[in-house]
Amino acid sequence: MAKTIAFHLQKGGVGKTTISGTLACQSAINGHNTLVIDCDPQGNLSSWFLTQPPKYELSDVLQGKCFVEEAIIKAPELGNLSILPTFGIGGTLKNYSETKLAEEPFVIQDLVKDVSENFEHIILDLSPGLGRLERSALIASDEIITPMTPEVFSLDGLEIFIDELGKLKKNMRSSVKHNKIIINSFDERIRQHRDIFRAAEESGRFAVYKIPVDPLFRKAQEASKAPQQFKVRGRGLKTKTIQAIADLDNSIWR
Ligand SMILES: Nc1ncnc2c1ncn2[C@@H]1O[C@H](COP(=O)(O)OP(=O)(O)OP(=O)(O)O)[C@@H](O)[C@H]1O
Ligand SMILES: [Mg+2]
C-alpha cells in the first residue's frame, strides 16, 4: 500500500509543484517506485517532466475514457518515477472539475486506492485554491504538508487553510494528517524569513522544515530535468538545498 502525500496551501506560487516534483524525484532516485498525479489543470508538473505530449490525461481516467494503466507514463531518465499527467493546454480537467466532480467527490480517492498496490509513494500536485478538485485530492491523501513562502501574510494564509481543512475533514469524515509545514524559498540572510520560521516553530503545532531559495529549481524545470540531476556550468543545487531535500525525504515517508 502506497503512502499518499499532497503538498498544499490555497495560495498560488508557494512552491507546491516545485516541492512535489523535487520530492518525487528524490524518492525515485532513492529507489522507491513513485507516482506523481498532476491534479492541477495548469499541468505545470506534467510539462516539467514530459517532453512528449502524452496520449491520455488524469481527467480521461476520472471520466472512464481509459484505464489508469494506460494514462500513467514513466518519466524519461528516472526509471522509478511515473506520472499521471494533466494537459495544461487543451486539457479537460478544469471542465470536469466544474461539472461532473460535484457528484463524485471520492473519485480521486478511488483512483489512488486503485493504483496504491503498484507504488510505494504517491504525491499529488494541486492547483492553488480550495475548490472541489483540491478538496477531493486532499481527502484522497494520507498526509497533507503545507508549503509556504516567508512573507508577511503567509501565517494568516496558513490559519485559513487549517480552518478550512478542519471543516473538510469533519464533513468528509477524513482523518488525513496535517502536521508539517515547509518554509520555501528561505533565505537565512533575511531577518523576516528567520522571524517567520521562528514564529511557525513557536506555534508548536507543526514540524517546520525549510527549503532554501535556489535558482537551480527554475532552471531544472525549464530544462525538463530533475533538480538533483541538473547542472548549470558544472554547478548543481546548493549543498544546503540538497541537505534540506534529504531531511524532508527522511521524515515524510515514515
Ligand atoms: N526554493 C526555491 N528557490 C527558488 N525558486 C523557487 C523555489 N521554489 C519554487 N521556486 C520557483 O517559484 C516559482 C513558483 O513555484 P511553483 O510553481 O512550484 O509554485 P506553485 O505553488 O506550484 O504555484 P501554483 O500555485 O501556480 O501552482 C517557480 O518559478 C519555481 O521555479
Ligand atoms: Mg503548481
Image (spheres, rainbow, N blue to C red):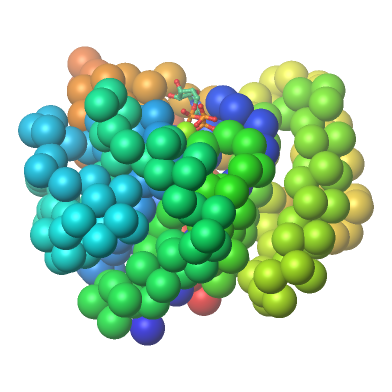
**Residue 113 position within the rendered picture, expressed as x and y whole percent measured from the top left:** 38, 77
**Residue 110 position within the rendered picture, expressed as x and y whole percent measured from the top left:** 41, 72
Q: Residue furthest top?
A: 233
Q: Quadrant of residue 196?
A: top right
Residue at horizontal 23%, vertical 46%?
57
**Residue 219 position within the rendered picture, expressed as x and y whole percent measured from the top left:** 31, 20
| 193 on left or right of 246 | right
Residue at horizontal 45%, vertical 51%?
100
Tell me: residue 202, above or below residue 68: above
| 205 on left or right of 56 | right
Q: Is residue 145 visible?
A: yes
| 197 on left or right of 175 | right
Residue at horizontal 79%, vertical 36%?
157
Position of the N terminus, as image quadrant, is bottom left
* Towards the viewer: 238 or 252: 252
Residue at horizontal 49%, vertical 53%?
101
Label total for image: 0
Q: Is residue 20 visible?
A: no
| 248 on left or right of 2 | right
Tell me: residue 200, above or below residue 82: above
**Residue 104 position within the rendered picture, expressed as x and y whole percent measured from the top left:** 50, 63
* Towards the viewer: 150 or 87: 87
